[in-house]
Amino acid sequence: MAVCGSWPGATVELSVAALYAPVLMVGQTGQIIDILRGRDSGWPAQARAGAADWAGSMRRHGRTTVLAALFAAGLWASMPELLPWQAPTLAGLLLGVPLAALSGSRAGGLALRRIGLMVTPEEMSPPSELLAAEYHRGRFTRAAQATLDSLIDSPAVARAHYAATPPPQPDAAVDIATAAAKIAVLGDRRAAILALSEAERAAVASHPALAHTLRNAAALRQAAE
């Protein structure tokens, strides 16, 4: 998470971090216990830029939420004067499910960005160097697309190009495979060219069979279906 260069952004950041702290404490304690028991504590990949996963958050934090609620009720019934002192910890545990779900929500992140929270100053006002890099990357993408289009559409250009191009190197095998997979899945030449990375475009430019596959992407996908 990033802190916007303002008091509202810093306040939101610190508040969310304080709520997360007890949730992380419980999770890390569980991992240490698993390690001491000789079990795999797990290190699953995070789901980023997706929708709010309420079901997954409930599976991971539902039990902790229930225990925190029971502890808060017991504290209220037996020693209510201690409840304010435990409130910061209990608040984070009680809100573990919505915290986990909403923090993984792309819509929530974009909503905060629109009002200028949880962003860096560079996101709100990009520096000239970043704007220039984005501009030139767009130019490169359009130029690469035009180059591949001419290579695919013109047999004469293709013959001259591949006659002067050395065969692909062994270390290009992965790029060739991923480029072929993207072409097969997308089934559209324009979409495939835009989806290819720089290394994958270079693989197409050095591999005649791959260029042929790209030329006939739509027909090959229709035949497969």
Image (spheres, rainbow, N blue to C red):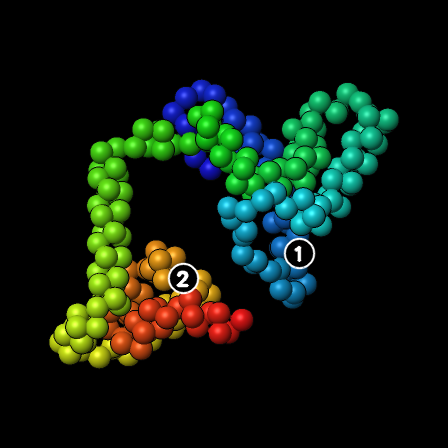
* Mark identifier at residue 122: none
Q: Secondary structure at mark 1?
A: helix
Vertical position of residue 76 compared to residue 198: above or below:
above
Q: Nearer the viewer, mark 1 or mark 2?
A: 2
Depth order, front residue of 131/38 = 131
Amino acid type at image mark 1: Ile
Q: Is residue 98 left or right of residue 167?
A: right
Q: Is residue 59 left or right of residue 148?
A: right
Q: Which residue is mark 1?
A: 33
Q: Is residue 62 left or right of residue 202?
A: right
Vertical position of residue 192 compared to residue 24: above or below:
below
Other-residue count near label 2 (Cα within 10 Å), few / some / many at <14 / 14–19 / ≥20: some
Q: Secondary structure at mark 2?
A: loop
Residue at x 61%, y 49% (from the top left corner)? 28
Depth order, front residue of 95/114 = 114
Q: Which residue is mark 2?
A: 188
Quarter holding the C terminus is bottom right
Residue 121 position within the rendered picture, expressed as x and y whole percent measured from the top left: 35, 29
Q: Is residue 25 visible?
A: no
Residue at x 26%, y 67% (from the top left corner)? 152
Residue 50 position within the rendered picture, expressed as x and y whole percent measured from the top left: 54, 47
Residue at x 50%, y 46% (from the top left corner)? 49
Other-residue count near label 1 (Cα within 10 Å), few / some / many at <14 / 14–19 / ≥20: few
Quarter holding residue 148 = bottom left
Residue 124 position within the rendered picture, expressed as x and y whole percent measured from the top left: 36, 29
Q: Is residue 149 left or right of residue 19?
A: left
Amino acid type at image mark 2: Asp
Residue 74 position within the rendered picture, expressed as x and y whole percent measured from the top left: 84, 32
Looking at the rendered structure, the number of numbered marks drawn on it comes to 2
Alpha carbons under labels 1 and 2: distance apart: 51 Å
Q: Is residue 37 visible?
A: yes
